[in-house]
Image (cartoon, rainbow, N blue to C red):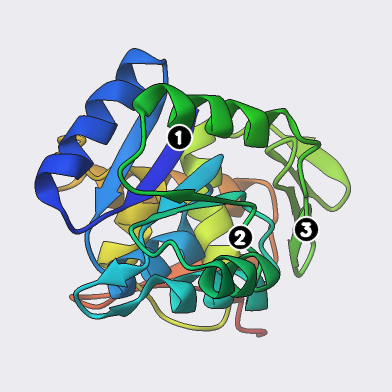
């Protein structure tokens, strides 16, 4: 299960990652609000641990952006701000829990487990383009109503492209959608995944295709009519 930790204190971030890994969770570690917003728009996480005092802004804006996008990802705010007014405001803005620093790791893990036991808030179950439908809950793809067997990594690529269909998705953001941030990736791994996905869509008669914009990124759009 993959979690996002947004924390600018490098020592605390590493300690959290170690504790979460020991508890069986995979983690991505980010230190700025800008990085967190970009990751949350392209990557699906089971939950987010979010600090409020970030070097480039308030973590509350990350939370608001996530909720404005219609995403129900559980968010546990972990911050040194302990005044009641801030707690109430943050919870009203969409946080699922609020933990004041310093905290005990066991309590953090217990709160994460409690959040993950809640029924999932599946806001975005179906992504559609042309004759293609991707069920993001079941991670299944159908073209013209027929289910197509597609490897999970290619489905992750497709999901990210569908969320930005008709618009350029930069290469870096697409990589962030399919690989954890500490995962070693070969230079051409993304091109291979995109190429295989494009061939698969072509062979099954999809009415959309993936176009590479050299040096910039990728676009998923309707095929040009003859």
User: Mark 2 vs mark 1: which is more N-terminal?
Assistant: 1
Where is the C terminus found, in terms of image quarters? bottom right
Q: Is residue 108 above or below residue 165?
A: above
Looking at the image, can residue 200 be seen?
yes
Residue 2 image label: 1
Task: Tell whether 157 sits left or right of 70.
Answer: left
- Count of picture labels: 3
Q: Callout 2: 10 Å neighbours few (<14), some, many (20+)?
A: many
Quadrant location of residue 142? top right
Residue 97 in the image, given as x and y percentages of width and height = 60, 50
CA distance for labels 1 and 3:
18 Å
Looking at the image, can residue 151 be seen?
no
Residue sitting nearer the eye, 211 or 167: 167
User: Mark 3 vs mark 2: which is more N-terminal?
Assistant: 2
Residue 123 image label: 3
Residue 95 image label: 2
Mark 3 falls on what kind of element? loop
Residue at the far right: name it: 145
Task: Tell whether 189 sits left or right of 115.
Answer: left
| Residue at 69% across, 57% down | 72
Q: Callout 3: 10 Å neighbours few (<14), some, many (20+)?
A: few
Residue 154 in the image, given as x and y percentages of width and height = 49, 42
| Residue at 76% across, 41% down | 120
Residue 118 in the image, given as x and y percentages of width and height = 76, 35
Residue sitting nearer the eye, 105 or 211: 105
Residue sitting nearer the eye, 40 or 32: 32
Please identify, in this view, whether the residue under mark 3 or under mark 2 is nearer the observer: 2
Task: Tell whether 197 sits left or right of 224.
Answer: left
């Amino acid at each position: 299960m993959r979690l996002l930790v947004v924390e600018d204190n490098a020592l605390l971030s590493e300690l959290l990652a170690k504790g979460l890994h020991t508890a069986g969770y995979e983690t991505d570690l980010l230190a700025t609000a800008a990085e967190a917003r970009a990751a949350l728009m392209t990557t699906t996480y089971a939950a987010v641990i979010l600090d409020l005092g970030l070097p480039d802004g308030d973590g509350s804006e990350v939370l608001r952006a996530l909720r404005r996008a219609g995403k129900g990802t559980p968010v546990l705010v972990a911050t040194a701000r302990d005044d009641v007014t801030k707690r109430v405001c943050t919870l009203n803005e969409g946080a699922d829990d609020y933990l004041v620093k310093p905290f005990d790791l066991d309590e953090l893990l217990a709160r994460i487990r409690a959040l993950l036991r809640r029924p999932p808030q599946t806001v975005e179950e179906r992504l559609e383009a042309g004759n293609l439908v991707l069920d993001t809950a079941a991670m299944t793809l159908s073209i013209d109503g027929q289910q197509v067997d597609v490897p999970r990594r290619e489905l992750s690529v497709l999901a990210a492209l569908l969320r930005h269909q008709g618009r350029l998705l930069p290469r870096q953001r697409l990589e962030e959608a399919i690989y954890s941030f500490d995962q070693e990736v070969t230079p051409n791994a993304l091109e291979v995944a995109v190429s295989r996905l494009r061939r698969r869509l072509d062979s099954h008669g999809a009415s959309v295709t993936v176009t590479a914009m050299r040096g910039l990124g990728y676009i998923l759009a309707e095929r040009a009519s003859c």
